[in-house]
Amino acid sequence: MPIRLPMTTRYDQTVALLGLARSCGKVLMENVMFVHHPQHSTVRRPAAGGVSGELRSVRAEFTVPRRPAGDIGHEPQLGGGALWDTGVYPVRAALHLLGPDLGSSPPSSRTAGRTGWTPRARRCCALRTG
């Protein structure tokens, strides 16, 4: 059963939902469709094959038009903001290109607004090697 991002904003809630789905014989997953678009396979093949040498980093940006006041995208407690609502896309793109063996360096982010909504967030990831 595909769920809109983010599924939850808390680990314990995610574990509970996964347990409920499993007990009902269902699969629960976040709906991340962009990795199935042909352009991402086109980019992934040379990256995975080392055509340009060793892939050491991925820089990805994801932008959306400014949302109107009152939009759920401004409410971090409801899954809005750069981390929960849009931040998953660059991270998922890096996982798609580099595989699941990603480590990470400390994140850096900028926040703005009275609600603490984060319009921009940056997370540096590194491929774990031997």
Image: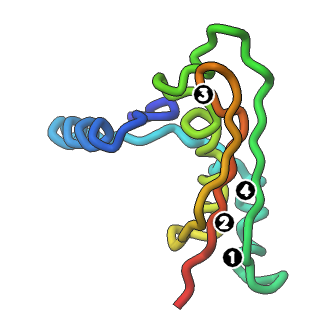
Q: Nearer the viewer, residue 74 or 116?
A: 116
Q: Earlier in the sequence, mark 1 or mark 3?
A: 1
Mark-to-mark CA distance, 3 and 4: 33 Å
Q: Residues within 10 Å of mark 4 (few under 14, many from 20)?
A: some
Write the residue at 84% across / 81% down: 52
Which mark is first along the chain, 2 or 3?
2
What is the C-alpha distance between the residues marked 1 and 3? 38 Å
Tell me the distance, in whole angstroms, between the alpha carbons under discs 1 and 2.
7 Å
Report x, y in % for residue 128: 55, 79
In what element is the residue under mark 1?
helix
Whole-percent x and y of residue 6?
49, 34
Gap between marks 1 and 4 measured at Cα:
12 Å
Q: Earlier in the sequence, mark 1 or mark 2?
A: 1
| SS for callout 3 | loop
Q: How many marks?
A: 4
Give amino acid for label 4: His
- Circle 2 sits on which residue? 97
Q: Position of residue 38 (x, y in %)?
A: 73, 52
Of discs 2 and 4, which sits in the foreground? 2
Residue 91 versus residue 37: which sits nearer the camera? 91
Q: Give the mark toward the camera: 3 or 2.
A: 3
- Closer to the chain start, of discs 2 and 4, is 4
Q: Which mark is residue 116?
A: 3
Which residue in the structure is indicated by mark 1? Answer: 48
Which three-letter amino acid code belongs to the residue tagged 1?
Ala
For residue 40, the mark is: 4
> In percent of the image, x 73 and y 71: which residue is there?
57
